[in-house]
Image (cartoon, rainbow, N blue to C red):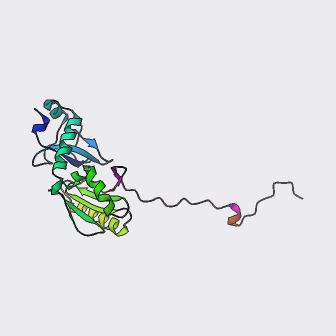
Amino acid sequence: MQVTSIRFMPVLVSTAEGWVDERHLLEDLTESIAVGYSYGPPYGQRFVTWTDLDRMGTNRRELRRTAVDHLYANLDRVRIHGQPPALMLSFDGLESSVLLAEEFWESMAPSVPGDLVVGVPARDVVIITGSQSPPGLEKARRAVDRVLFAGDRHPLSRDLLVWRHGGWQPLRPPRPPRQRSPHPDELGYRRRSSGPPR
């Protein structure tokens, strides 16, 4: 069976999902999100296992290339909704798969203040803002919390992700400035003379 005769789509999954195990061909995107490869359409119901890969007589690289090519071939269906400071993506229920389309994000980067930041609380939800937009970041965090509280069928991550150096990584809060230890003189203590008493 040739891989090119079957339609695959890369689909993001949470590594915490109960069905995810070593049988499935998964590749890490972040600490808590993996990329699986789904047969379809419909996509997101049946994922390629290592046994499937052997049966198809192909390798991981070829499967990845075929799935990503299929994703790119369908990017004309991606829509962006809303107004700054936070936008929403729509892509037929596979919104989070668009995170794998590097060229899409490179073209989006100039349209947000700072680095691109996304919330991906579920497979079908992507919120877009910029790292230098406090209202956008707050709106994205609230949206992530609402989706996870509502209990989506395919939850992904509570983390906001930032696009840096051509890839996604969790957005960490800035570290507070390091406190300098006060000099003893600043605390009002007098130094003792190191010489003998007079």
Q: Quadrant of the C terminus?
A: bottom right
> With 176 as the anchor, is 21 left or right in this view?
left
Residue 117 occupies which quadrant of the picture?
Answer: bottom left
> With 141 as the anchor, is 124 left or right in this view?
left
Q: Quadrant of the N terminus?
A: top left
Q: Quick check: can you spot residue 118?
A: no
Q: Position of residue 6 (x, y in %)?
A: 10, 40
Q: Residue at x 28, y 61 (%)?
A: 128
Q: Is residue 77 magenta?
A: no
Identify the magenta region.
163-184
> With 24 as the anchor, is 186 left or right in this view?
right
Q: Position of residue 70 (x, y in %)?
A: 16, 46
Q: Residue at x 34, y 67 (%)?
A: 138
Rendered position, 113 above or below 65: below
Q: Nearer the viewer, residue 144 or 97?
A: 97
Residue 157 occupies which quadrant of the picture?
Answer: bottom left
Q: Nearer the viewer, residue 26 or 107?
A: 107
Rendered position, 99 above or below 176: above
Q: Quick check: can you spot residue 115?
A: yes
Q: Residue at x 33, y 67 (%)?
A: 136
Q: Is residue 182 magenta?
A: yes
Rendered position, 1 above or below 10: above
Q: Position of residue 93 (x, y in %)?
A: 15, 56
Magenta region's main secondary structure? loop
Q: Position of residue 142 (x, y in %)?
A: 29, 66
